[in-house]
Image: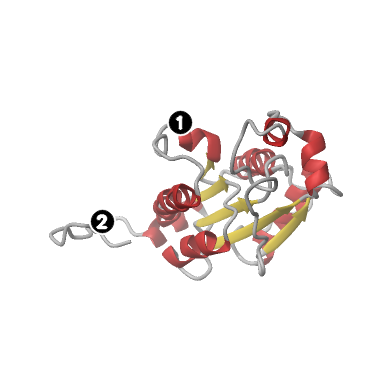
Amino acid sequence: MKPKSKNIFWEHGNVSREDREQVNAHRGATIWFTGLSGSGKSTLARLMESALFARRCQTYVLDGDNVRHGLNRDLGFSPEDRTENIRRIGEVARLFTENGSIVLTAFISPYRADRDMVRGLMRATDFIEVHVDCALEVCEQRDPKGLYRKARAGEILEFTGISAPYEKPLSAEITLHTDGNTPEECIDQLIDYLEANGYLTQLPETAEV
């Protein structure tokens, strides 16, 4: 989406992204958790934030509910509003990433086109799509916020997985199976991915994280 005004220009700062990454001792990136409600996205994002913070990484979590309290409080859950919700948070995530930070997002983001749109905002390796894969019946059994119960009762319309679609990633960078692995095991898999692909400096085996 192009700005409505033609008389605006991008201002470049004096400190480059590369300068920030050198100080941080890690690469900037957006780790985009996507999955059904109750699949464990927020849990994994928070645990990952703690694991990265322990390694002195610059990191921050952008959570779906939290963003809708402020930046996106004017948006509902229609397909159009869902797309605008993801577009806005994608722009915020891009700014964090260009700052040399590792931003963790926890959004259902049910549409592939919307996730691809965010990927397209960034450098080729900046966007790490993490499919938090969990069977619908397991998510319903967890139902930490009681949302599935309300959706089944017709109290919530356009609820992903029940009355609205969820399009699974076709080529996510990594898939975490939260109905067969513990959150800690999933975090270990994600840390291994980041180390293997040069986002993080690999720590000695004796180091505590």
Instruction: Give SS at disc 1.
Output: helix
Q: Nearer the viewer, mark 2 or mark 1?
A: 1
**Residue sitting farthest toward the right:** 180
Is 207 drawn above or below residue 98 in the view shown?
above
83 and 123: which one is in front?
A: 83
Is 47 drawn above or below residue 87 in the view shown?
above
Instruction: Give SS at disc 2.
Output: loop
Residue under the image location 43 percent in, 54 percent down: 87
Residue under the image location 68 percent in, 47 percent down: 36
Which amino acid type is shown beneath numbered disc 1? His
The quarter of the displayed image where residue 18 is located: bottom left
Which amino acid type is shown beneath numbered disc 2? Asn
Quarter of the image with the C terminus is: top right
Residue for badge 2: 14
Mark number for residue 69? 1
The quarter of the displayed image where residue 169 is located: bottom right
- Rendering coords of residue 114 (x, y %): 50, 59
152 and 108: which one is in front?
A: 152
**Residue sitting farthest toward the front:** 154
Locate residue 165 relative to residue 136 in the image: left or right: left
- Rendering coords of residue 115 (x, y %): 53, 60
Residue under the image location 72 percent in, 39 percent down: 38
